[in-house]
Image (cartoon, rainbow, N blue to C red):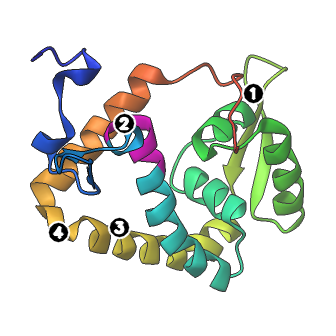
Amino acid sequence: MNNPRHASSVPAASLGSSAPSESAAGATELHFVDDYLPALLAQASQLISSEFHEVARKHGFSISEWRVMASLAGGEPISIGQLAQVTVTKQPTVTRLLDRMETRGQVERLPHDSDRRITLVRITREGAKAVEHLMELAREHELRVLEPFGLARAEELKRILRRLIELHAHAPGDAADED
């Protein structure tokens, strides 16, 4: 039962789960999704992200545009496939988004140095300037979300999530679902 690879080795009660339900006998039970990691991650992501999406919209960005800009800001150019994976958006949708954003001067496409099949994308100076204040607001939102857990626990959570992503990441060509 203490094997971390075994799904039932970490009961929700030991992790401070909230949302139990009462059974007919009065014992506390959890719904399956209240103790299922993918459901918990999805729900937390949806709740926390939706709080900030309202801010992004007020600053003139759609959610998809915000995800693209935030993914490209401060980094090296990445492939459209990688961008689709990071933004959790289907590649054809990312391509259409990039068309619009490129027209506005926010991003630019570049050829890959060694593989002509790959197109890279990077944020432009104009795009970085347009999203700079929004990224500051995003960091402030993140601090408010993580504050109840303390810095050490917040950093540990982020480290664990990065490791989960690393362990379960698929090749950039794999389908990213919005459903």
Residue visible at 36% across and 29% down in the picture: 164
Q: Which residue is mark 4?
A: 148
Q: Which residue is mark 3?
A: 142
Quadrant of residue 110 within the rendered picture? top right
Q: Secondary structure at mark 3?
A: helix
Q: Which residues are magenta?
A: 35-42
Q: Secondary structure at mark 4?
A: helix
Q: Nearer the viewer, residue 45 or 159?
A: 45
Q: Is residue 23 left or right of residue 131?
A: left
- Local crowd at mark 1 within 10 Å, few (<14), some, or many (≥20)? some
Quadrant of image for the C terminus: top right
Nearer the camera: disc 2 or disc 4: 2
Determine the CA span between mark 3 and mark 4.
Answer: 11 Å
Q: Residue 49: x percent and y percent?
A: 50, 63
**N-term mark: 1 or 3:** 1
Q: Is residue 36 magenta?
A: yes
Q: Which residue is mark 1?
A: 112
Q: Secondary structure at mark 2?
A: helix
Residue 78 in sight from this viewpoint: no
Determine the CA span between mark 1 and mark 2.
Answer: 37 Å
